[in-house]
Amino acid sequence: MDAANRYLAQEYKPSFNVEFMQPPPEEGSAFVPWIGANLDDILCQQEERTVNADNCVSVDGYKLQIPPNKYRCHYVRVRVIVHRYRDGSLAIFHGPRKLADYDKQGKLMEVKTKKAT
């Protein structure tokens, strides 16, 4: 096995690279920075739930109360998506809109506002 690995590294790979390697068509890197959606909201566990008559969603024995907002007076019988993040925190989404954030124990957290840059 050692002889085969030595042959691949010393003989085969250099001759293969000489025959098939092509120079890049452009200068610079082909990698670009991610400028899309928040990756934490993509790389998390997502579950669809229906909001109960008390404007709450049940998750793992916790009742997550959806706070009032300017878009709707309530979300009763609306289908929402609950996101469970790697740190154990939760969030409720209705379409692309985040309705609320909760800590590991299901306690409502303050809404995080983005700073203008």
Image (cartoon, rainbow, N blue to C red):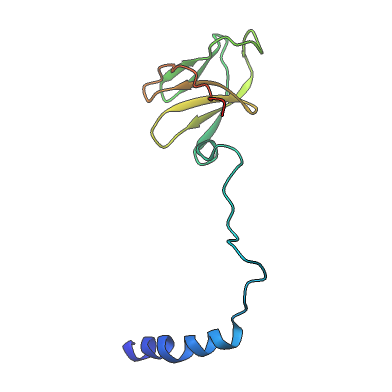
At horizontal 42% and vertical 28% (from top left) the residue drawn is: 89
Horizontal and vertical percent for residue 104? 37, 25
Q: Taking 93 as reference, is 68 above or below it?
A: above
Comparing 65 with 102, the one in front is 102
Q: Residue 40, relative to residue 77: is it above or below?
A: below
- Residue 53, quarter of the rendered image: top right
Q: Position of residue 85 (x, y in %)?
A: 45, 34
How many marks on residues? 0
> In the image, residue 43 lies at what x, y percent?
51, 41
Compared with 91, 42 (above or below) is below
Q: Residue at x 63, y 16 (%)?
A: 77
Q: Quadrant of the C terminus?
A: top right
Q: Is 108 left, or right, of 77 in this rendering?
A: left
Residue 24 in the figure: left or right of residue 91:
right
Write down the quadrant of residue 79 in the picture: top right
Look at the image and tell me in which quarter the N terminus lies: bottom left
Residue at 60% x, 42% y: name it: 35
Q: Is residue 13 above or below residue 96?
A: below
Indicate the position of residue 37 as horizontal and vertical percent values.
59, 38
Q: Is residue 113 left or right of residue 7?
A: right
- Residue at the outermost left position: 2
Left or right: residue 109 versus residue 17 is left
